[in-house]
Amino acid sequence: MEKFFKSLLHQLHKQKYENINEATWGEAQVISEIRTFLENKRYLVVIDDIWDKSVWENIKYSLTVNEHASRVITTTRILNVAEQAGDVYRLEALSVVDSRKLFHQRIYETENKSPPNQLFEISEKILRRCGGVPLAIITIGSLLSSKTEREHTHEYWSKVYKSLGSRLDNGHDDVKNMRRILSVSYSDLPPHLKTCLLHLSLYPEDYEIQTERLIWK
């Protein structure tokens, strides 16, 4: 959280807080500085991907409530966090047309090219399984785009389709289903890259990884 607040302060005024990351300020001192800085200003702050209600409470406290029509927009995949933050706008899934465009763009690098006739039906089934969730479509599209032309067979696409499990059309982002979608992409990797990813998962998010240490692992 301390790193987050320092980043927020730096983005609010890059010149004034140019060296904030080197400062020895604690979390409370950074929050106090943010509140003072915003006290008499009209501001729009966008915070992406809040993961916990307690985290939101900390962030909310740091953003001074004033009478200058300031606004805070947040994104989250967790409904009760969104409800605690305020008015909720729930994103709709992509339409069939937009899902198809994104899928084709990912596989063929153009939305105007479609799978050959023998693959069209199975590609539509794959899209239905993805349920209009962009991350699912991009993940499976990327998996298929990495294959050579010889590997683009009905048998292989059917195997991918069967691996996807139930479709994601239940109106919200089902974490278990998304993990299943992502695991299909992971399972398709060669063994040495699987091992590499497993080692990477040992490190916290945004951690600076020493190349030599990772190679030795």
Image: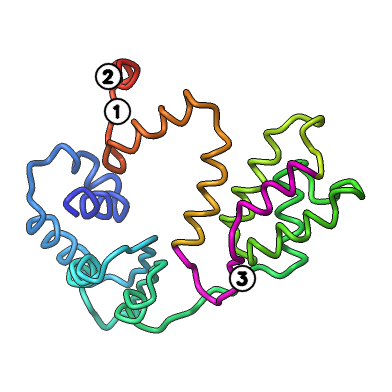
Q: Is residue 42 left or right of residue 152?
A: left
In the displayed structure, 146 sits above or below 129; it is: above
- Name the residue rendered at 68%, 53% in the picture: 161
Q: Amino acid at mark 1?
A: Ile
Q: Amino acid at mark 3?
A: Ala
Q: What amino acid is at disc 2? A: Arg
Residue receiving disc 3: 93
Crowd tier of the residue under label 2, counting other residues whose Cα lies within 10 Å: few below 14, some 14–19, many 20 or above: few
Count the labels in the image.
3
Q: Which residues are magenta?
A: 155-175
Q: Are marks 2 and 1 in contact (CB under 8 Å)?
A: yes
**Dot 1 corresponds to which residue?**
209
Depicted 113 relative to depicted 46: above or below: above
Q: Is residue 116 magenta?
A: no
The quadrant of the rendering that contains the C terminus is top left
Residue placed most toward the observer, 132 or 208: 132
196 or 188: nearer the viewer: 188
- Which labelled disc corresponds to residue 213? 2
N-term mark: 3 or 1: 3
